[in-house]
Image (cartoon, rainbow, N blue to C red):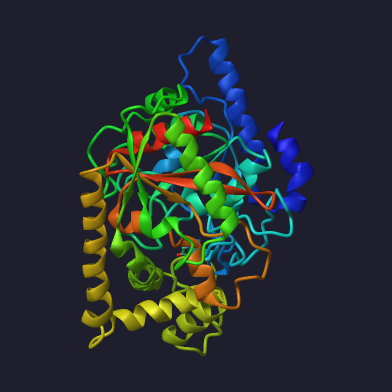
Amino acid sequence: AFLDRIDALDGTIGAFLHVNHAGALATADEVDRAREAGEELGPLAGVPIAVKDIFCTQDMPTTAASKILEGWVPPYDSTIVQRIRAAKMPILGKTNMDEFAMGSSTEYSAYQLTRNPWDTHRIPGGSGGGSSAAVAARLAPLATGTDTGGSIRQPGAVTGTFGAKPTYGGTSRYGLIAFSSSLDTPGPVSRNTLDGALLHEVMGGHDPRDSTSIDQPVPPVVEAARTGANGDLSGVTLGVVKEFASGDTQGAEEGVLAAYRAGVATLEKLGAKIVEVSCPNFLHALPTYYLIAPSECSSNLARYDGVRYGVRVGDDGERSLEEVMSTTREAGFGPEVKRRIMLGTYALSAGYVDQFYGQAQKVRTLITQDFQTAFAKVDALISPTTPFIAFEFGARTSDPYQMYLSDLYTIPTNLYGGPAVSVPCGLSEGMPVGLQVMGPTMGDEITYQVAAALES
Ligand code: GLN
């Protein structure tokens, strides 16, 4: 049924870069046979899933929506994909994204636009716009995403879906195409909190092949989502981030703030104690992120040299190795990726590294301290997920800073490493608005509990 729906609607939505018809049907048949044989199956066996095209899949192309990886089929599966296969979930295909996950609208995909199912003139968010649009358009019941600065939560907010960024290290990065290794976090995209929790438990858990993977059990997020669904938040203290609650300095849309405040009022009615918390360093998160993420990306993307992966351009037998590498990179990378490589290379260069990268690392510590101070007083922090609803195509592509503002509220969590989810909290101008719940590291349960309570 989902494959039929993709055939009928994805010409308009553009969520998929690759559809895995035969593979998905084969897994579905396998599940049917296992069921008939009375085999014990997990809760998501037979439930189809869409996979962001940044996860390596050994039987499907993996491009990260970049021309430089066009046609590349990896020799192995990422850990997340291995776990999805072990759970017997049919993989419907690979979803569109901003090139190498750099962007907030999916407009930086080298291949196609993805349209927001709520209004096809508007963006589906990014970088994981394909995954969120697929779930919002009911082309898939579940999808995977990756969140480096907001790429699961922001698309979730603007498409009216649920998205979770787990604790950094709680989900494996092995076989995930690297953007910013100290921030990249795989997570679930779903229609609602409980579905997301079920997928989180399939994806999560220790992986010895990822050196930053946390060697602890997956936080019991399914149980937390079920608890939250009872709609009782008595005994839970939520901190409203003062710096993100007013539109004065941050340019948040009034309609977004109104829907968010209605969400806060509902949480209070459910018994949560709401207090105001000041996190002054959160206001420095955006510039901090735009030094750290490009610095790491400039190093991670050095491997695309036309020798080992994907396309090679200009290898005419006359040019030197170095010339072939630079022609390949010039032709293969899009404008946003080049901008990040330039920014990162500059921030790391001799003479500037302390002033830029070193300084950003210090501010990152201050942001972490803001979280720790807050979590001594509250169970979770809340804010809007994004400052604005889905914008129209082209509205923010000419000024990178305007695009970067999309992640104003999501980025502090990535710099800290904690968990955060986005859950729908209402509409503004007929478009969905998301409420963000941020928790302490390895305390993913509270984010699910609060989100499920809001849905109840
Ligand atoms: N929009 C942010 C960026 O462009 C975050 C991307 C992400 O989380 N992958 O870097």
Please identify the residue farthest to the right as the structure is shown.
8
Q: How many marks?
A: 0
Above or below — where is 191 with respect to 430? above
The answer to whether residue 179 shows anywhere in this view is yes
Above or below — where is 122 with respect to 425? below
Q: Position of residue 186 (x, y in %)?
A: 42, 47
The answer to whether residue 161 shows anywhere in this view is no
**Looking at the image, which residue is at 56% across and 54% down?**
256
**Looking at the image, which residue is at 46% across and 42% down?**
264
Is 160 placed left or right of 241 in the picture? right
Q: Position of residue 335 (x, y in %)?
A: 55, 77
**Looking at the image, which residue is at 73% across and 48% down?**
10
Above or below — where is 84 with respect to 119? above
Above or below — where is 95 with respect to 359? above
- The one nearer the camera, 139 or 306, is 139
**Looking at the image, which residue is at 27% across and 71% down?**
360
- The one nearer the camera, 410 or 215, is 410
Q: Position of residue 129 (x, y in %)?
A: 59, 54
Q: Quadrant of the N terminus?
A: top right
**Image quadrant assignment for residue 128:** bottom right
Is 232 placed left or right of 432 in the picture? left
Q: Position of residue 450 (x, y in %)?
A: 41, 34
Is 123 placed left or right of 170 in the picture? right
**Image quadrant assignment for residue 126:** bottom right
